[in-house]
Image (cartoon, helix red, strand yellow):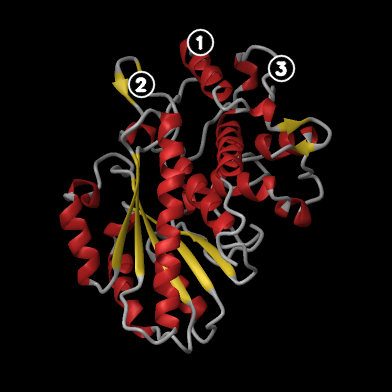
Amino acid sequence: MYGSGFSKEKIKKKIRAANYITVAQIFLKDNFLLDRQLISDDIKPRLLGHWGTCPGVNIAYNCLKSYFDDENFSFILGPGHGFPALQANLFIEGEIEKVDKKATRNRSGLEYICKNFSWPGGFPSHCTPVTPGVICEGGELGYAFAMAYGYVLGHPEKTTAVLIGDGEFETATALASMNLNKMLSGKNNGSVLPILHLNGYKISAPTIAGRKSERELNELVRGFGFTPILVRGDNEDAEAAIDYIIDDFENALKEADEIFRAIKRGEKKNPPFIIMKTDKGLTGPEELNGEKLRGNFKSHQVPLPNAKTDKNEREILEKWLSSYRFIELFDEEKGFVI
């Protein structure tokens, strides 16, 4: 039964663990459990990765996987550049170890995963064919939406959630794919749950969707034949926002589930479309040198670009990593205790 395994406290712990590993992958080449104060040699010489979207990916992934606890459920990640978040979750679940024996769920595996992210001969910064379970690379923005619909055609037992970034939502491919819900019939095909991650910014500017009023965005979604469902996590301090958004997400998934069941019964209902609103870079540093990071485009990629050479940025990074209290969630030998 859907929803039976939805545990708020467990989800919060998984999000904390995934956020920590996400940040560690982007920044660290040593001292992965903060056994001592961070020094320059602990930081990778070249910082690659996209932080801004990752907290939202971790929230959506863990809420969805906890609710749709069924082998016929799939998650498709549109913003493939958010791969450190996806890889963090796949590592926590033990999926990477199934294809790479070095990725053990203990200290050794954690070091291996983090050091080798965006590292020569290691893990790339985007989803690739070697990612366990991947069917969408996600680098060419917009295609994930169409792929989600193609995946459930002729498979009424399948449910697929597809996360779309609001920058990605500006592409012609994504907008054209909004029409694909008209192709699905309740009896012969599966269900697609689109989730728009509305964090307001792309690489160097606000997004169009982020500039729309709530009413305007809802009417756009309705115009394509969907039922908009809002999930909010943008108006609290970081920890409170996570708490609030998990509750909101659970209610949204229950509503979506009811709509899908009604459609399967032959009732005429518009399929659900979740709009998940969070700050860009939620749980990350709020500012640097007087400039806003969280809730701004400056958190899109690497928010502390000089952490290796700048002591102040390195101290901010250490405080950031420590805020997730990862050591409470991880045993060096036994692995995760969540």
Distance, label 2 to label 1, CA atoms, is 16 Å
Task: Name the residue type under label 2.
Answer: Glu
Residue matched to label 2 = 287
> Foreground: 156 or 269?
269
Label 3 vs label 1, nearer the camera: 3
| SS under mark 2 | strand
The answer to which of marks 3 and 2 sits earlier in the sequence is: 3
Task: Name the residue type under label 1.
Answer: Lys
The answer to which of marks 2 and 1 sits earlier in the sequence is: 2
> Foreground: 206 or 335?
335
Q: In which quarter of the image is the C terminus?
A: top right
Residue drawn at 57 percent across, 44 percent down: 11
On the picture, is 70 further left or further right than 200? Answer: right
Expressed as whole percent of the image width and height from the top left, the position of residue 289 reads 34, 14
Q: Which mark is residue 294?
A: none
Q: Are marks 3 and 1 in contact (CB under 8 Å)?
A: no
Residue matched to label 3 = 35
Number of other residues with Cα within 10 Å of mark 1, as a class: few under 14, some 14 to 19, many 20 or more: some
Distance, label 3 to label 2, CA atoms, is 26 Å
Task: Tell how many labels.
Answer: 3
Residue matched to label 1 = 311
